[in-house]
Amino acid sequence: MMPNPSAAGTWLANRAPASQPNLAETMAEMGRRAREAAAVVALAGPESKNTALRAAAKAVRASEVEILAANARDLAEAEGEKLAPALRDRLALDPKRLEAVAAGLEAIAERPDPVGRSLARWSRPNGLNIERVAVPLGVVGIIYESRPNVTADAGGLALKSGNAAILRGGSESFYSSRALVAALADGLRAARLPEAAIQLVPTRDRAAVGIMLGMSGVIDIIVPRGGASLIERVQRESRIPVIAHLEGLCHTYIHAAADPEKARRIALNAKMRRVSICGATETLLVDHEVARTILPPILADLHAAGCELRGDPQVLALHREVKPATEQDWRTEYLDAILAVRIVDGIGAAIAHIERFGSHHTDAIVTEDTGAAERFLREVDSAIVLVNASTQFADGGEFGMGAEIGISTQRLPPRGPVGAEQLTTYKYLVRGNGQVRP
């Protein structure tokens, strides 16, 4: 699990771009320190890790003025870069959101320790006792965009799972992330754990991403969290296994047997509670049997909340503010107050639409028909499938994990919210009493 720390220097000597000698040296040193820290935190007891997490939460609260000032600096630069409103929302911190960051670290501390769990055990006829136990991955490289809260979530989850983390945050959140990592370092010091267990790449230079993706033998897993272009680049260039968080092209389907008031509440919340998160519904599908009665109030609610509506010809006839949808609308993760709406001919058509246009992230059905609900749960191949609930529940915190690094949309595990438990692998412990193989 933990190769020789000198692997970082060896790799960079062979692979680092000649035009980036200082950055290459910086990344080599980060890799060396991360491997050393990983060896320590892998053996740290639950109390030590939890002490660090709680102290980090305390430091976040104590540093509120400094962290919000750093975030204001990021927001001021984003204003100059004409960052879209939805992306500004993802970037922005305020006292309430910062308290949620601190509470998230405490929630991670309250979770059971994932390291050392006995996953299975059995005995062989020859007397060998075999046990499969959870162990840390080692060094986790996390590449993400915009949202500074990911800095605290990722660092906290990596620590809880006994891993070291190298964080490469988005350039938009550079100062915010730096301030949050300083608070995490306070927590590590309080628990007498190595500060190098959570490191932030200290540059906005995109060349750092390329270096990280080639640090095989130094970084054990890469977790990208961001837009489609980032994920595609990571999957194309990485020489390290990847836990992929693809775009959240989420659907809510209102079935013919939906409760109208329940459908109305869920549809509004699924889109408008917070439009910039990956669990926001981007396409609303409505069964043709109930579209004329159930859909107009939903469209009115969404329009009144400031949502731009784009629909097929049948939807256009139900509300004067709906704009014509194109096929591209069915393929778009807006991360904005825009919703595509389509009327479909039954549950089979809804499932087919989701399979064709969805991203296998999160999809929901609203229905009082148990058979339809079970069919939707069985046939929709997404990481998270819900019945009679908002897609905005696609979140590790809401799943009781304390926090998440992202939602994995790949079919290989881990899938869905990636929390501390999902950042472990396993090994086999075999206990004998002198057995030899004939």
Image (tube, rainbow, N blue to C red):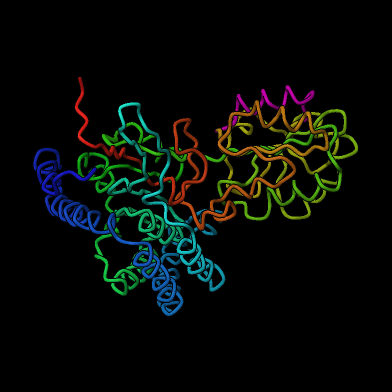
101 or 20: nearer the viewer: 101
Residue that sits furthest to the top in the current view = 438
**Residue at the spot 44% in from the left edge and 67% down from the top edge:** 76
Query: Residue 361, percent across and down?
Result: 56, 38
Q: Does the magenta stretch include residue 127?
A: no
Query: Residue 402, percent across and down?
Result: 51, 58
287 or 122: nearer the viewer: 122
Identify the main secondary structure in magenta: helix
Q: Is residue 353 magenta?
A: yes
Number of marks drawn: 0
- Quarter of the picture containing the N terminus is top left
Residue that sits furthest to the right in the current view = 293
244 or 205: nearer the viewer: 244
In the rendered structure, the answer to whether residue 128 lies left or right of residue 60 reads: left
- Quarter of the picture containing the C terminus is top left
- Magenta part of the chain: 343-359
In the rendered structure, the answer to whether residue 202 lies left or right of residue 406 reads: left
In the rendered structure, the answer to whether residue 195 lies left or right of residue 371 reads: left
Vertical placement of 178 versus 344: above or below?
below
Image quadrant where residue 223 sits: top left
**Residue at the spot 68% in from the left edge and 26% down from the top edge:** 351
Query: Residue 398, percent across and down?
Result: 59, 54
Query: Residue 174, percent across and down?
Result: 36, 61
**Residue at the spot 33% in from the left edge and 31% down from the top edge:** 236
